[in-house]
Image (cartoon, rainbow, N blue to C red):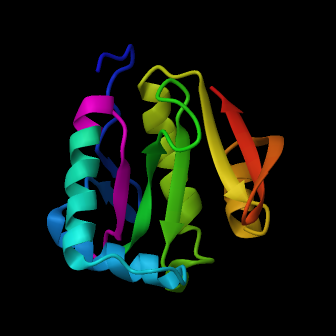
Amino acid sequence: MKYDFTPMEFHLKTERLDLRMWEESDAVWMRQLVGERGVAIPTLDDARNQIINMRKRAVENGISLLTIRRRDEGDFIGYCGLIIGRSTLEEPEIAYELFRSAHGKGYATEAASVVLDAAIATGRHRLWSTVGAWNVASLRVLEKIGFKWHHSTWDERGEIVWNVREI
């Protein structure tokens, strides 16, 4: 697939965080994070296959979700990155999810800020994010990094808020 954008950087650092491409060994953490959602947990093989496919798509598309680790502790606390999601490769979505134990410490805002910078460096002009209306904390993170409400849609789980960031 050809795209007119510079591939995003797949290793990002902040003062407290290290974001990088998924490794197959991260399947254990992926399963635990999915488990916190209260949905069916993928098998270890399925999680590994998801990671392998994600890495392949990253090379093809030039965007990806990245794992988030705290730099001092080295522990996996979630992910953040760019995805096609409900949008397009030209105007991807920023997405993030953290373990509940990492909530309320500014990690999501810190990770999303550095991913936003990486997205800007690709030459894109607009990013999206879709968030369940109930997820007030995620909506606050988006507001802090300059996203604005655009519109809402609904699915079987309720209202989905579409936020946009013009770059």
Q: Nearer the viewer, residue 85 or 94?
A: 85
Image quadrant in which you'd find residue 56:
top left
- The residue depicted at 34 percent of the width and 73 percent of the height is 30
- The residue depicted at 59 percent of the width and 58 percent of the height is 109
Q: Is residue 5 magenta?
A: no
Percent of width and height locating residue 159: 80, 58
Left/right of residue 24 with respect to residue 22 in the rendered view: left
On the question of residue 149 being in view, the answer is: yes
Left/right of residue 30 with respect to residue 118 in the rendered view: left
Residue projecting furthest to the front? 156
- The residue depicted at 77 percent of the width and 67 percent of the height is 136
Q: Is residue 136 above or below residue 57?
A: below
Q: Which residues are magenta?
A: 58-74
Q: Quadrant of the N terminus?
A: top left
Q: Is residue 155 above or below residue 137?
A: above
Percent of width and height locating residue 34: 44, 76
Q: Is residue 153 above or below residue 49?
A: above
